[in-house]
Amino acid sequence: DAGVTQSPTHLIKTRGQQVTLRCSPKSGHDTVSWYQQALGQGPQFIFQYYEEEERQRGNFPDRFSGHQFPNYSSELNVNALLLGDSALYLCASSLVPGSSYNEQFFGPGTRLTVL
Amino acid sequence: KQEVTQIPAALSVPEGENLVLNCSFTDSAIYNLQWFRQDPGKGLTSLLLIQSSQREQTSGRLNASLDKSSGRSTLYIAASQPGDSATYLCAVRGGAGGTSYGKLTFGQGTILTVHP
């Protein structure tokens, strides 16, 4: 049973560029959440996608956008990159938000470095 | 706004010791609480999930308790081993008004080092 997968593993960009990160959820899961983890900090919630729509959003600017595809995979896009966007980006999958048992499973993350 | 605090920030113990990691949260209206392990530069591995109606969960040498009314959880690790060295993160899924329905709010983690 494949777990959550993310690509790429590492990415180096320069300020002002745009980046797209990808995530495939665990088999059987239909909800994808994205988190940003700065060095030495706990992950911060960016947004959650279910049924191809953004259902909930954290305190992140509009430069952060996403998409969910019919096969439940998801993309995170970040425009106009800033140095402060350097972080580990984590994708988590789970069952439909309304499920009372809603354990989130995380992927290995994408390390983004902005120079 | 839900806030999660973990104490201590770092812990160093000799192999074989039993230890307790602490987590507190400000809004008791949670759906569940998860404990995760994170190795350096890696993703998160789910260790235990406690539903809001439960008091504790056990998996091997790990035992997590939840006191929702007081906003506290503890992770107990028995007979610690060098392989337990990692960062341990506590996260809650809040239920207040549905605004935190799906997201996890994390603490900053406890860095555990178990030395031989």
Image (cartoon, coloured by chain):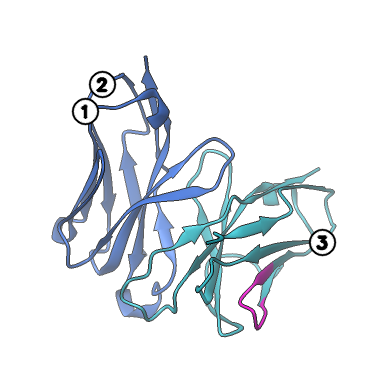
Give the crowd class for mark 1: few <14, some 14-19, many >=20 residues within 10 Å: some
Amino acid at pointer 3: Gln
| Tag 3 and tag 1 share a subunit | no
In 3D space, how far apart are the residues under numbered discs 2 and 1 (Cα atoms)?
7 Å
Is residue B103 magenta-colored?
Answer: no
Chain identifier for the cyan-coloured part of the image: A
For mark 1, what is the residue?
Answer: B18
Residue A18: mark: 3
Q: Nearer the viewer, residue B76 or B95?
A: B76
B77 on left or right of A43: left
Amino acid at pointer 1: Asn
Segment colored magenta: A68-75
Task: Determine the residue positioned at 25% across, 69% down.
Answer: B29
For mark 2, what is the residue?
Answer: B16
In 3D space, how far apart are the residues under numbered discs 3 and 2 (Cα atoms)?
48 Å
The answer to the question of whether label 3 and label 2 lie on touching residues, with beta carbons closer than 8 A, is no
Amino acid at pointer 2: Gly
Return the x and y of residue A15 as percentages of the image width and height. Answer: 83, 51
